Amino acid sequence: MRTRAMLCLAALAALGATACLPSKQDVDTAQAIMEMGDAVNDIRQTLSDLQSQVDSLREIVVKRDSTIKQLANLAGVVLPP
């Protein structure tokens, strides 16, 4: 009797374990979500790099404009605003 109960319990456990296995569609969906997450992270990194370049270019433009204004003042040239 005890052996029969153990066999029934083992069969139920095996049936439950197979019922919880993910389907191919679930696996494909999970893979696609992971790939999209990686793509979003790559885009964030690219945006960060581009922002650093823009900031650097802004600094260069400010320095150039300051130099032009100083040269214009020394030469007595009036620059439009």
Image (cartoon, rainbow, N blue to C red):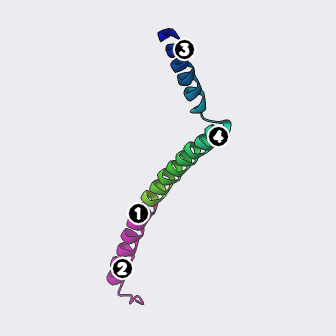
Q: Is residue 20 above or below residue 38?
A: above
> From mark 3 to mark 1, how far is it between C-alphas?
70 Å
Q: Indicate the quadrant containing the C terminus: top left, top right, bottom left or bottom right.
A: bottom left
Q: Mark number for residue 55? A: 1
The span shown in magenta is: 54-81
Q: Position of residue 70 (x, y in %)?
A: 33, 77
> From mark 4 to mark 2, how far is it between C-alphas?
61 Å
* Residue type for callout 2: Lys
Q: Is residue 80 left or right of residue 19?
A: left
Q: Secondary structure at mark 2?
A: helix
The residue located at (47%, 51%) in the rendering is 45
Q: Is residue 13 left or right of residue 65?
A: right
Q: Secondary structure at mark 1?
A: helix
Quadrant in the rendering for residue 7:
top right
* Labels 4 & 2 near each other (Cβ < 8 A): no
The residue located at (53%, 53%) in the rendering is 43
Q: In this rendering, which labeled residue sits more in front, label 4 or label 2?
A: 4
> From mark 1 to mark 4, how far is it between C-alphas?
40 Å
Q: Earlier in the sequence, mark 3 or mark 4?
A: 3
Q: Earlier in the sequence, mark 3 or mark 2?
A: 3
Q: Mark number for residue 69? A: 2
> From mark 3 to mark 4, how far is it between C-alphas?
35 Å
Residue wearing tag 4: 28
> From mark 1 to mark 2, how far is it between C-alphas?
21 Å
Q: Dot 4 surroundings within 10 Å: few (below 14), some, or many (20 or more)?
A: few
- Residue 3 drawn in magenta: no
Q: Position of residue 5 (x, y in %)?
A: 50, 16
Q: Position of residue 63 (x, y in %)?
A: 36, 69
Q: Position of residue 34 (x, y in %)?
A: 55, 43
Q: In this rendering, which labeled residue sits more in front, label 3 or label 2?
A: 3
Q: In this rendering, which labeled residue sits more in front, label 1 or label 4?
A: 4
Q: Earlier in the sequence, mark 4 or mark 2?
A: 4
